[in-house]
Image (cartoon, rainbow, N blue to C red):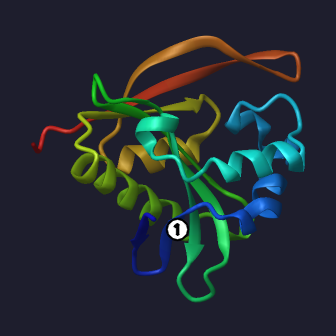
Amino acid sequence: MITLKGSTIHLRALEPEDLEFVHAIENDEAIWEVSNTQTPYSRFLIRQYLENAHQDIYEAKQLRLAICLNATSEAIGLIDLFDFDPRNNRAGVGILIKEIENRAKGIGTEALGMLINYAFHQLQLHQLYANIGAENENSMQLFSKFGFKEIGIKKEWNKVNGIYKDEFLFQLINNKK
């Protein structure tokens, strides 16, 4: 089991006990725009997903970790490596802190730093990328802190409430091999 520990949070593999937490996130329409979700997920589907969460990143082509507070072990967010491509040594990164009151406290910064370190040192990835909606200033600032560069814009990429919105592509190359 993967556990990554920082000063205020730790990242851990998803457990069956995370069913209600993941269900709440996947069904929160307020965050569907950042997660690119279009329909609700049933508890049944999420339970099946959690039952297969034991697969390693090479099997599943993704890794989803819970962001947990060290003080309480409470899960407060999720961070993902997705579209894992071992041939080209790259993966996408996504992060979400569920409750607004837990945002802008450095938690996302700590979690992303740990995931980048894991991806580059443990998985030996060459690059990471992030797809960020043009209106998501906080995510752009977060990824830029770690050296992610905006390398392109996907014009009118996502349709949100009948309006087409742009999405930026950010990339981080691991030049420290």
Please tell me which residue is depicted at 47% across the width and 36% down the height of the picture: 59
Q: Nearer the viewer, residue 38 or 84?
A: 84
Q: Secondary structure at mark 1?
A: helix
**Residue 84, percent from left and from top:** 42, 32
Q: Position of residue 134 (x, y in %)?
A: 60, 28
Is 60 located above or below residue 104 in the figure? above
Crowd rating for badge 1 (residues with CA inside 10 Å; few <14, some 14–19, many 20+): many
Residue 66 appears at what percent x and percent y? 59, 62
Which image quadrant is residue 104 in?
A: bottom right
Residue at 58% across, 23% down: 167
Query: Residue 58: in sight, yes or no?
Result: yes
Residue under numbered circle 1? 107
Instruction: Choose top left, top right, bottom left or bottom right for residue 161.
Output: top right
Which kind of residue does numbered mark 1 sit on? Ile
Does residue 34 appear left or right of residue 70 in this picture? right
Q: Residue furthest bottom?
A: 71
> Where is 35 relative to 141, above or below?
above
